[in-house]
Amino acid sequence: MIKNQQTIKEPVSYAGVGLHTGNKTRITFKPAPANTGIIFKRMDIEDCPKISADVDHVVDISRGTTIGIGDAKVHTVEHVLAAISGLELDNIICEVEGNEPPVGDGSSLPFVEKLLKAGFVEQDSPRDYLIIDKTIAYSDPSKGIDIVVFPSDEFRITFMVDYKNPALGTQYTSMYSLHEEFATEFAAARTFCFLHEVVALRKAGLIRGGALDNAVVIMDEDLPQEKIQELRSLFNIDKEIKISNNGILNGKQLRYPNEPVRHKALDLIGDLALLGVPLKAHIMAARSGHGANAELVKLIRKEYKKKLIKSKYQVREGGKNVFLDSEAIAQILPHRYPFLLVDRILDLVPQEYVVGIKNVSMNEPFFQGHFPGKPIMPGVLIVEAMAQVGGIMLLNTESDPAKKLVLFTGIDNVRFRKTVTPGDTLRYEVEMGAFRRSICKIIGRAYVENELVCEAELMAAITDKE
């Protein structure tokens, strides 16, 4: 069943203070046209700069997710993004009067309530889901972090954390339906931290908007009277601070028995919104945080970009090991027979690497004179084929590659290791070395049956066709 995109019916606002900055702030959610995505606008800055909520604009993940362009930044956007994504809204403008949304109660619930009050409207454009069709994994052994993304017909999350603190221990949660469970079972889960972190974070200039009513503070150390006084002074608390028996400062009651791990899942939902497209996948995460979430988003986004390229150029299924066939290549490269020297692209990651194939046939026109009775592929054409494979990667860094040309400006460190003769299959592996303002360096290697036959470094410029 095809689902259409959604936005809200009318503007709605929420005011408060930012968690880390402590600044008074207000966020106003406004409807946006189809295919806009999620946009943050800094209304307190001249010209009201817009920042798209995508992983390319993430500038900090130390204690939350911060996005920015130049000097314009919006801190701690994950709870807002979780509310928007969790309610399956696609297009929305988030106008922020300040550099951080309000912290509210430390969860996504205040934003969810406001968005539900605004009401939703279906738009005349289908939702473009990213359907995961192979396993994607991210791991950081030094931190014990593991995340695995599996194919699934729906978006699902399984999350596990384990802490040495007895107030938390090992916690687990699963979400099987975003539509049915997010607003009621996850949106209200509040941010949490350990008591030993609180003073250090405040002294580091963070959690200036932190208070006992917008976070769950887990007691992981003794709380003598002098520490109580330090907390009251640092956070300007005039109420009594109590030592509780449930392991939580002031005896605060949890909203869910496993509220901390549910908040971790909420953060993950918010960070996954930085993909810019809804997912159909099952994500299993252990001990993940904002940094790992951002790295996972980058991995998934590579797959998304590959799917976009393939769907744009590949008209028919090209076989199990074919990413782009000869017809698709002809749409990208301007070269034609007898100078088109790439038959297939096996794999491509935009701005990173590309793998291409050239089947060397006895019918190649250059064999007539190079050399009669001893056919050898000219080295200059081996390098030319390498350049064409690299050109496919480079042109796909452009928004409109059909209007661009790749002109090679230099070749360095060329080495020919073995002759190439009729019947050989050349496999080119080309990776990006550097890319700055349409000037780039690529590093290429050519293999025949896993034996290196040529390597080179090439410089190129991307220019307009006209």
Image (cartoon, rainbow, N blue to C red):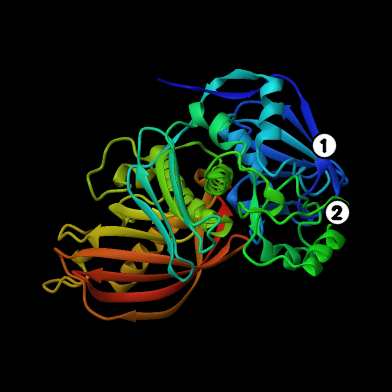
Residue beneath the point at 63% across and 33% down: 36
- Residue 32 visible in the snapshot: no
Q: Residue furthest front?
A: 245
Three-letter amino acid code at the position of disc 1: Ala
Decide if residue 431 is in sight here.
yes
In-image side of 437 versus 300 (left or right): right
Amino acid residing under circle 2: Ile
- Tell me what residue is drawn at x 79 percent, y 66 percent: 225
Image spot of residue 362 (x, y percent): 15, 61
Please give the label number shown on residue 344. Answer: none
- Dot in front, 2 or 1: 2
Q: Position of residue 164 (x, y in %)?
A: 51, 64
Mark 1: secondary structure:
strand
Quadrant of res 25:
top right
Residue designated by label 2: 237
Label 1: which residue?
Answer: 15
* Residue 134 in the image, given as x and y percentages of width and height: 32, 47
Residue drawn at x 31%, y 64% as measured from the top left: 428
Label 2, label 1: how many angstroms apart (C-alpha)? 21 Å
Q: Residue furthest left?
A: 373
Q: Nearer the viewer, residue 431 or 360?
A: 431
